[in-house]
Amino acid sequence: MSRFAAALFGAASLAFIAPAQAGSTLDAIKARGSLKCAVQGPSNPGFGVPGSGGKWIGFNVELCRAIAATIFGDADKIQISALTTQTRFPALQSGEVDVLTNNTTYVMTRDTQLKFNFPAISFMDGQGILVPKKLNVASGKDLNGATVCVQPGTTTELALTDFFRKNNMKFTPVVIQSRDELTRAYADGRCDALTSDATTLAAQRSTLANPAEHIILPDRLSKEPLGIAVRQGDEEFRDIIAWSFNTLVNAEELGITQANVDEMAKSTDPEIRRFLGVEPGLGAALGVNEKYAYTIIKQIGNYGELYEKYLGEKTPLAIPRGLNRLYTQGGALYTPPSR
């Protein structure tokens, strides 16, 4: 097929694409007028905390806002629930919430047995170990016989057990459900070490009296692809979440920011014009407003902007982007193109 013919075919295809039909979850969200979105509870600095006036802020909260911006054209149409590791899955299964953005690791059994979909991997993390500097250890392999604080019912607990078994070491777990209580137990010296996702450890370390007196050891006990989770059975809602997240990343790739999105909308670059809805097609294909990508970036910003605002080097968490850099910058952040 010639390039001209291919172009005509593509244009004709877009013209006859019917808007996606809403499933039960998306219907309920539209009827309600807001998105019920769950983040880590009771709070997790950088990722989700109640701000002034009780309005939640943080990286994972912004993911909720991006989805709401796509559906409603208004990022503020969200209801935030702060759920623990034990309450998050029942809440999603029962319909108490529509979506989890609370750093849930994407693993096979949550897909096949719990019947969840993970439309996007929003953060690539790894399980780490936090210890006091005064313990004078340089590796998790120096912790034979240690007491370790860990949350129950998580992939973290399994990875911790595997790590000690592989290295022929023993440990005594201190199992506490609440993340805040777990951190307090560590701060009170009830355990020698605290384990969780490395980013969660960075967040919890920032709440300690003297964060500089604690280090995250270099060991990574597991890979933790943290995803956005929804119930299976509503592919239209799944698509909206996937492409809301992809929009954040693709905007960074294209150099489109919250500050320059209006200027970029005047670009003659056909890819940018389609992406921002200046030339129609993508919004109709997703069953939303043609300007959904513009709206997300205008109201929220791109992925890199959110990262630097809540998690980056200039924040109390100071988490290097590492794998979460764009693939064009040496990272592993690689999403499908918006076309």
Image: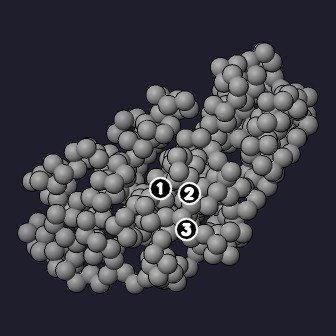
Q: Which mark is residue 90?
A: none
> Between disc 1 and disc 3, whose residue precedes?
3
Cβ atoms under marks 1 and 2 closer than 8 Å: yes
Discs 1/3, front: 3
Q: What's the residue type where badge 2 is placed? A: Thr
> Between disc 3 and disc 2, whose residue precedes?
3
Question: Taking 18 as reference, is 102 above or below it?
Answer: above
* Rendered image quadrant of residue 2: bottom left
Residue positioned 81% across, 51% down in the render: 177
Q: What's the residue type where badge 1 is placed? A: Leu
Residue positioned 32% across, 81% down in the render: 19
* Mark 1 burial class by Cα count in 10 Å: few <14, some 14-19, many 20+: many
* Viewer can see residue 217: no
* Rendered image quadrant of residue 260: top left
Q: Which mark is residue 63?
A: 1
Q: Which residue is mark 3?
A: 36
Q: What's the residue type where badge 3 is placed? A: Lys
Q: In the image as oriented, which residue stretches furthest toward the front?
A: 53
Discs 3/2, front: 3
